Structures are given as structure tokens and as C-alpha cells.
Amino acid sequence: MTRVNRNLCHALCDPESSFWLPLRGLQPWTEELLIMASVPAWIELGQLFQRLVRPFRAWPWRLGLLVGRAADDDQKLSLAEELLSCCDHVDPFTADYRKHLRMPADVLSNTNMAFTKDLFDHVPMSNMISED
């Protein structure tokens, strides 16, 4: 998702980008048209980041890095240490998840890693707020 945001930022920064062609057509930009077109696009990009990128950088979403392929053993150890250093009030899920974990080895144990993988594979998790 961050690559998508980065690509959108590059397109939004260039008023001559083909990204804008459906809105601008073949006419040159006027200041009014550029503002009318770009402000909603920048707001939407911000919403994408706030809803689909930023929340997943926090606990409990960072636990997914423990069971994914993106993190190597050193990074997983660092994540385990970070998890254990979190305050209990971070969120109810993280507090409950770590209540039997005392050391990084507990976090990285086969039993806990299998449990964590099952959580992310089978439990529907959502950061989306229900809206009217």
C-alpha cells in the first residue's frame, strides 16, 4: 500500500501527469480547476494512508510481521522484545495476547508462532470503522 501511495503522490505532484487527463482533458490547467481537482485527490490519498497504512504499523497489527516472510530472525527477535516492552494498556488484544509471554523466546516459540499465524490466517480482523 505504501508503494501505491508513493506512486499516487508522484502523479499528484505533476500537473502534466496522464493521471489528470480525465479531469483536465486536453485543455491547460487553470488555477481554479487545479484546486478543484487536486484537493479531493490529496484528501483521498490521506484517507488511504490513515485507514490502510498507519493502523497496521501499530500493535496488534505488527504481530503479523512475526509470521510473515518479510522479517528475518533478527527483526523477529526485535519485534518480540518490542511486544514485551509494550504497556499493558496498549490495547485489549495485545494485553491478553502477551499475558503468558515473559521472554522473547516465549514469543518466538513454535507454539506461540503457530497460534499467531492462525490468528492472522483465520480470524477476520478489520481496522475499518463502521460508518453510516
Image (tube, rainbow, N blue to C red):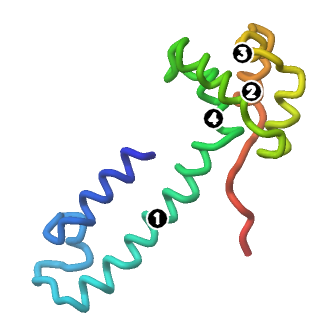
Dot 2: element: helix
Helix, strand or loop at disc 3?
Answer: helix
Task: Calculate the distance from the C-alpha at mark 4 to the C-alpha at mark 2.
Answer: 13 Å
- Residue highlighted by disc 2: 84
Q: What residue type is labelled 1?
A: Gly
Q: Quadrant of residue 3?
A: top left
Q: Please give the residue where the numbered disc 3 appears in the rendered image.
A: 104
Cβ atoms at labels 4 and 2 below 8 Å apart: no
Q: Earlier in the sequence, mark 2 or mark 1?
A: 1
Q: Is residue 13 above or below residue 29?
A: above
Which of the 4 image quarters holds residue 12? Answer: bottom left
What amino acid does circle 3 point to?
Pro
Q: In this view, does 67 lie above or below 49?
A: above
Examine the rendered structure and indicate whether residue 105 appears above or below residue 12: above
Spatial distance from mark 3 to mark 4, Cα to Cα?
15 Å
Q: Say if mark 2 contacts mark 3, CB within 8 Å.
A: yes
Q: Residue at x 83, y 45 (%)?
A: 89
Q: What element carries label 1?
A: helix
Query: Mark 1 sits on what residue?
Result: 46
Depth check, front residue: 82 or 8: 82
Q: Disc 4 on helix, strand or loop? A: helix
